[in-house]
Structures are given as C-alpha cells and as structure tokens.
Image (tube, grey):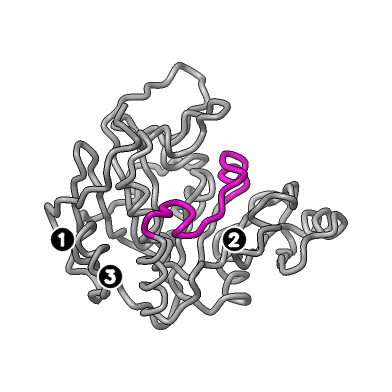
C-alpha cells in the first residue's frame, strides 16, 4: 500500500480538458493540479460526481472500519487534494446515509478532506464569490440519522436533510439542532428520485454546481435519471476482488442498464499521480 505520509506532489497532466471556462486557481493549486476548466451553468444545475475505485471496480470494501474511500485510494494525499478542489468548486455536496455511516465524523468541506490546503481552498471560494463550505445535503428515505454527529452539531456548514414525510416526522421528533433544515418529499416512502432531490436543493440553495459523492446506490439513481453531467474517477492501483455474494460495492449499485441503454462518457481529462490515474468523463445524453 502507498505510504499515506508521502509528500503532496504535483499531478502530471496527460490530457487536459478544454470543456468549460478556465478557473483561476491559486498558484499552489495550479502547481499541484494544473489548469482547471468547468462549465458555468446558467439555466440549470450542473451535476458532477467524484469517486475512487480499484482497478477491478470496487469503491468500498464494506468492512467495519474500512468502508471509506481511504482504503481504496491507499490514503492518497493527491486524491484528497482533488476531492478538496472539487468541494471548493461545488455549491452543494450530496451524500446518502450509507456514506455518512461509513465516516460519521466527517464534514463535507474542502479543508476537512485536505487540511494542508485549507488556505488555498478558502482563497478559491472567495475568488468565486461563494461560501467557504458547500451546503451539505444528506438524503435519507427513513430519516434514521444520528443528529448528534459533528456534521449537524459543529456549526461549520449549512446542512439539509432530504427525506420522506415519515422520515421528516421522525427527525423533527428528535429535536434537530438549530440550523438544520429538513425537506420532506411527499408521495414517496423509500427511495427519493433525483429530480425531487435537486428541486429540494434548489429551494434552499441557488448554487448551480452540485457534487454527488455517494454512495453507489444514490449515484446509480442519478445515472438512471440521466442527471450526471461529469464523472471524476480516481483509479487506484490495487485489486480488491470479490467473493461470490459479498457486499463489496462498485461505482453504481441498484441499477443495471440493458444493452443499448448503457451510459457512455467521453474521456476529457487525464492526470497521473504516481501510479494513480485521475480521470474525468463528460457524460452523454443528459435528460
């Protein structure tokens, strides 16, 4: 496994995206990542996702204490740098309860994932004239969430829980912390469809850049509705394997697209950090 204490080294640019407008990063971020372009959405929300995967497509080992992306990336500091950059650019970060349970003490901010670049991320958000931290959105059909976690009690970020009517009733009965917003989506008892999620987000936050960090079932729903514009994917140089019937997860779960209806992307950006590849795909056929 790579040494997690390895110094943060610049990525090597192998192919650079010409997609969107160039964003002015800080000198340090430019040295580490290179030039960065992203579309400036005007009429609708722009949805992008970021995951890390093994060579054989595993994104979570689903083992106690080892369900997060760190075990997949080998605790790559370059992967954390990219995660922090994407969070700094995002107006909203959306995760499901499985992602929250895998890392219950995490807060989805740039500095939480890569504290050594906190000042640079802050400078970038100021230059973009946006809040230092994106709105953190948790999607939960049941509303069974521990509201005493640091995400809700730390006061560091604005938080929103999107849930069903029954889930909202359960959350409100638990006396949620001040500042936590709860949006109930009527007429649904389990999975909440992504169009309804995005509508609920829009009512709270006018920002257009939406980052989906998981988990695989939630991302699968976004893909099923054709709502992913870009996929950032870190390819880690390890083979995790799967036993028959085990619980290890791939990038998309809960969806199986039939022949002729699979989701195709165009590779628009490739960077290398050691033996890790940092890939970026533009998705076709967004509805």
Give neighbour class at mark 2: few <14, some 14-19, many 20+ (Cα, 10 Å). Answer: many
C-beta proximity under 8 Å, tags 1 and 3: no
Q: Residue at x 29, y 51 (%)?
A: 264
C-beta proximity under 8 Å, tags 2 and 1: no
Counting residues from the start of the chain, the first of labels 2 and 3 encountered is 3
Counting residues from the start of the chain, the first of labels 1 and 3 encountered is 1
Counting residues from the start of the chain, the first of labels 2 and 1 encountered is 1
Residue 275 lies, with reference to residue 143, above or below; the image says above
Image quarter of residue 111: bottom left
List the residue tagged with mark 2.
Answer: 137
Q: Residue at x 31, y 26 (%)?
A: 1
Q: Is residue 104 magenta?
A: yes
Q: Is residue 188 magenta?
A: no
Secondary-structure class at tag 3: loop
- x then y, percent, for residue 26: 27, 70
- x then y, percent, for residue 84: 39, 57
Can residue 287 be seen in the rendering of this structure?
no
Give neighbour class at mark 1: few <14, some 14-19, many 20+ (Cα, 10 Å). Answer: some
Image quarter of residue 136: bottom right
Q: CA distance from mark 2 to mark 1?
A: 30 Å
Residue 270 lies, with reference to residue 75, above or below; the image says below
Secondary-structure class at tag 2: strand
List the residue tagged with mark 3.
Answer: 26
The residue segment tinted magenta is 96-117
Work out which quarter of the rendered image holds the C terminus and state it.
bottom left
- x then y, percent, for residue 265: 27, 54
Secondary-structure class at tag 1: loop
């Amino acid at each position: 496994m790579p040494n997690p204490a390895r110094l943060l080294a610049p990525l090597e640019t192998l192919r650079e995206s010409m997609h969107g407008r160039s964003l002015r990063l800080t000198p340090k971020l430019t040295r580490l990542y290179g030039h960065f372009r992203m579309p400036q959405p005007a009429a609708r929300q722009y949805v992008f996702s970021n995951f890390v995967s093994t060579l054989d497509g595993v994104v979570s080992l689903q083992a106690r204490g080892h369900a997060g992306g760190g075990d997949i990336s080998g605790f790559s500091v370059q992967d954390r740098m990219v995660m922090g950059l994407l969070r700094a650019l995002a107006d909203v970060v959306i995760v499901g309860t499985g992602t929250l349970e895998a890392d219950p003490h995490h807060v989805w901010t740039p500095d939480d994932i890569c504290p050594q670049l906190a000042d640079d991320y802050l400078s970038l958000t100021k230059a973009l004239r946006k809040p230092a931290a994106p709105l953190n959105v948790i999607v939960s059909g049941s509303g069974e969430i521990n509201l005493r976690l640091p995400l809700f009690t730390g006061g560091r970020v604005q938080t929103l829980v999107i849930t069903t009517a029954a889930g909202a009733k359960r959350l409100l009965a638990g006396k949620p912390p001040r500042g936590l917003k709860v949006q109930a989506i009527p007429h649904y008892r389990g999975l909440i469809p992504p169009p309804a999620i995005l509508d609920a987000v829009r009512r709270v936050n006018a920002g257009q850049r939406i980052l989906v960090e998981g988990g695989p079932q939630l991302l699968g729903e976004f893909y099923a509705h054709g709502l992913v514009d870009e996929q950032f994917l870190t390819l880690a140089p390890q083979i995790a394997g799967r036993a028959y019937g085990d619980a290890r997860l791939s990038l998309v779960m809960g969806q199986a697209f039939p022949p002729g209806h699979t989701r195709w992307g165009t590779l628009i950006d490739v960077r290398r950090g050691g033996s890790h590849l940092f890939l970026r795909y533009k998705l076709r056929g967004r509805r």
